[in-house]
Image (spheres, helix red, strand yellow):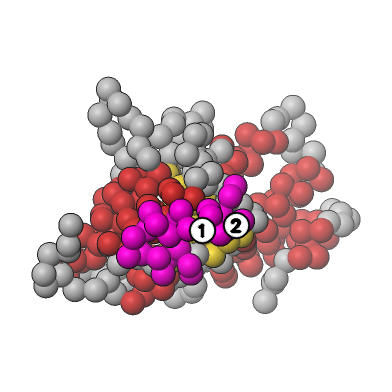
């Protein structure tokens, strides 16, 4: 099916700053189908985290390219990394697709709300949208790296979506939100760059180190404490100056208490 005549190409900043991330895909055909879903909506940046078979041999690559049809260029340009951190550490917004409810509630958006969040973010930084394994989706640990969780409302009688189908829905909503964006006033510019995912991880590791050193975890479950602290920081959105202030505060706590730690050595306090 051809795109309707007159629909303009996607804005360059969306093409350049929005990446679709497939975590441990097992089937090359799904990679090709995902590339096709992206390109029909104007998106081009595909990242593959530890794929099972791609691009390990020519036959698998051929299968992915066949399913991609005219989106072969997206397949060929795909970034392949070994870890999730490599895929998202430079992003200021990470959204993870999930069909499951979680023990600790997390900011939840549908595909349309996710698309609007993407449009609001691209003037400020890089955006990643994560899609999990075909059989089991994203793990709890992987979803904990996301500021928002994305849920696609399906019929309760049959809720299963192929990963490429899910990517098509999200890509479509991004395109439609962009086409409709002329009717919405732009958000006021923030005065500092948003913190990238790696900086937030550094803060959380530093905080966990200090809490352990001052025995805060005594009779508390460290995993649950840090999961809720992570959710707090994701809900409020931190910029890089705020990260530096908080890490400076933690470093001062360590110094005043005569504590040494890796976090204080790694902190950028400029």
Residue closest to the eye, 56 or 207: 56
Image location (x, y in percent) of residue 156: 28, 25
- Quadrant containing the C terminus is bottom right
Q: Please, what secondary structure does the residue beneath circle 2 have?
A: loop
Q: Residue furthest left?
A: 5
- Residue closer to the observer: 42 or 177: 42
Q: Nearer the viewer, residue 6 or 267?
A: 6
Label placed on residue 223: none
Gap in Å between the C-alphas at discs 1 and 2? 6 Å
Residue in the image at 32% along x and 71% along y? 188
Q: Which residue is mark 2?
A: 57
In magenta, the rendered stretch is 52-77
Q: Residue at x 19, y 73 (%)?
A: 8
Q: Quadrant of residue 159?
A: top left
Q: Answer whether residue 163 is visible to the viewer in this image.
A: yes
Quarter-wise, where is residue 176 in the image?
bottom left
Residue under circle 1? 61
| Residue positioned 44% across, 49% down in the render | 29
x and y percent of residue 217 in the render?
74, 35
């Amino acid at each position: 099916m051809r795109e309707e005549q007159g629909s303009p190409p996607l804005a360059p900043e969306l093409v350049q700053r929005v990446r679709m991330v497939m975590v441990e895909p097992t089937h090359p055909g799904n990679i090709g189908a995902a590339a096709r879903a992206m390109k029909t909506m104007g998106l081009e940046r595909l990242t593959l985290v530890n794929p099972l078979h791609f691009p390990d041999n020519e036959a698998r690559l051929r299968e992915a390219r066949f399913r991609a049809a005219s989106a072969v260029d997206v397949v060929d340009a795909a970034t392949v990394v070994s870890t999730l951190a490599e895929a998202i550490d430079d992003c200021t917004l990470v959204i993870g697709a999930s069909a499951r409810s979680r023990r600790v509630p997390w900011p939840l958006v549908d595909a349309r709300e996710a698309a609007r969040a993407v449009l609001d973010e691209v003037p400020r930084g890089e955006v990643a949208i994560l899609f999990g394994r075909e059989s089991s989706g994203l793990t709890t640990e992987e979803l904990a790296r996301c500021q928002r969780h994305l849920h696609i409302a399906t019929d309760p009688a049959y809720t299963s979506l192929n990963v490429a189908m899910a990517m098509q829905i999200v890509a479509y909503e991004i395109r439609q939100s962009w086409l409709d964006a002329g009717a919405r006033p732009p958000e006021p510019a923030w005065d500092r760059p948003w913190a990238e995912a790696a900086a937030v991880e550094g803060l959380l590791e530093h905080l966990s180190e200090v809490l352990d050193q001052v025995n805060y975890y005594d009779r508390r479950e460290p995993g649950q404490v840090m999961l809720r602290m992570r959710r707090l920081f994701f809900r409020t959105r931190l910029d890089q100056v705020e990260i530096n202030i908080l890490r400076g505060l933690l470093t001062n706590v360590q110094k005043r208490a005569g504590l040494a730690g890796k976090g204080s050595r790694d902190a950028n306090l400029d």
